[in-house]
Amino acid sequence: MKPALLSLLALAVTTGGAAAEEIRVLNWQGYGTDQEFATAPFAEATGHSIVHEYFNSEQEMLTKLRTNPGAYDVVLVNAVYTQQAVAEGLLAPIDTSGMENYAGVPESFAQNPMLVQEGTVYGVPWTWGLTSFAINSSVIDTAPDSIQALWDPAYAGRVSIRDDAVEALQLAALATGQDINDITDLEAAEAKLAELLPNLRTFWSSENDWNQFMAAGELDIASYWSGSASRSASLGLPVEFVVPQEGAIGWLDGLSVPATSEHKEAAQQFIDWMIDPDFYVRWDQDGAPASANAEAAAALPEEAFNKRVLGDPEVAARVTFQTPLSNERRETYLEIWQRLKAAQ
């Protein structure tokens, strides 16, 4: 049995033989925490069982937390929504002092102001990744180094982006030389997207959609997520992920404990196991996103996507991480996006 799990077992014994608890996890389906290789060793070491419930959007996740007090013990929260969840009283403070694997989280993540407020941790950094684009390497021999490739008439009718207002505007911000978190010239961004829409073959809404379009040979180039690109490549699709010279959109996911959880100690044990390097190295074989634990990332084989691509300092220097959007700003983006699609 691995050392970290032995520590969990020792903790279970020293806490007075506390009864096994059922830990309820709220997450995206298939996103690490519900894998058998994750839950089975943890249950064996601690006696705690893991039960999952899923959401399909961050807004649905927030709604579930608001309307089901006491129903969840661990929740996956994208960092841009953590402050909102804390302000609504939905999340509990987390004591990281007893987490063996937290030491591997670098300060840049551990002290991220979206997850830590006034010195109190409300989200443990777990995974991160990029939104950029990927190419069909069976069609494009040399990967382009600019996001302007999405607008290239050479790929007209064989381009796709996700049907998401915020993501679309942030891609347009990169293409117009603007800060994704402070788009000061929305007219320029909207005009850039208006130029892109005629180039599109379709929109995609899920990783499965994207894979089906690519497998059918319908796309040459499309926006995509780094972790998804790794998984798609592992399925044998001709996919090459590109981080262009203009940069990429970074995102960070954290694991939190709902304020109404009745099993907070057991929940923190599970979060500690989720940031364990041994768990992550196994998950990476299935196309995991990048780990926020530097020790976990370092333990990957050299050929691993998340080490070879996202571990490149030059790539990291081109990443801008998303910050929270106001509801007003989000609504503005949605209005622009709906207007553009209606006019297409």
Image (cartoon, helix red, strand yellow):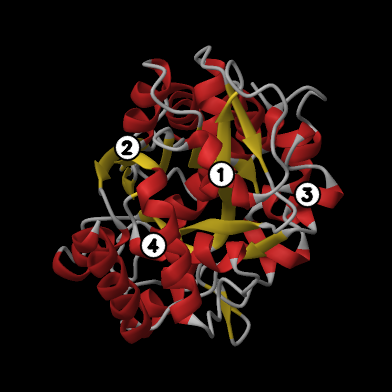
Dot 2 or dot 1: first in sequence order is 2
The one nearer the camera, 202 or 211, is 202
Q: Are marks 2 and 4 in contact (CB under 8 Å)?
A: no
Determine contact: label 1, label 3, CB under 8 Å: no
Q: Which residue is mark 3?
A: 315
Crowd band around label 1 with a 10 angstrom C-alpha radius: few (<14), some (14–19), many (20+): few
Left or right: where does residue 343 sit relative to residue 278? Answer: left
Going 50% across and 54% down the picture, which residue do you hit? 268
The quarter of the picture where residue 160 lies is: top left
Q: Mark 1 vs mark 3: give the one in front.
A: 1
Q: Secondary structure at mark 2?
A: loop
For the residues labelled 4 and 1, say whether their Cβ atoms are less than 8 Å apart: no
In the picture of the structure, the residue carrying the numbered disc 4 is 194
Quadrant of the rendering where the C terminus is positioned = bottom left
Q: What residue is pinned by disc 2? A: 29
Q: Tell me the distance, in whole angstroms, between the alpha carbons under discs 1 and 3.
A: 23 Å
Q: Hey, what amino acid is under mark 3?
A: Val
Q: CA distance from mark 3 to mark 4?
A: 29 Å
Q: Rounded to the nearest whole Å, what is the CA distance between mark 2 and mark 3?
A: 29 Å
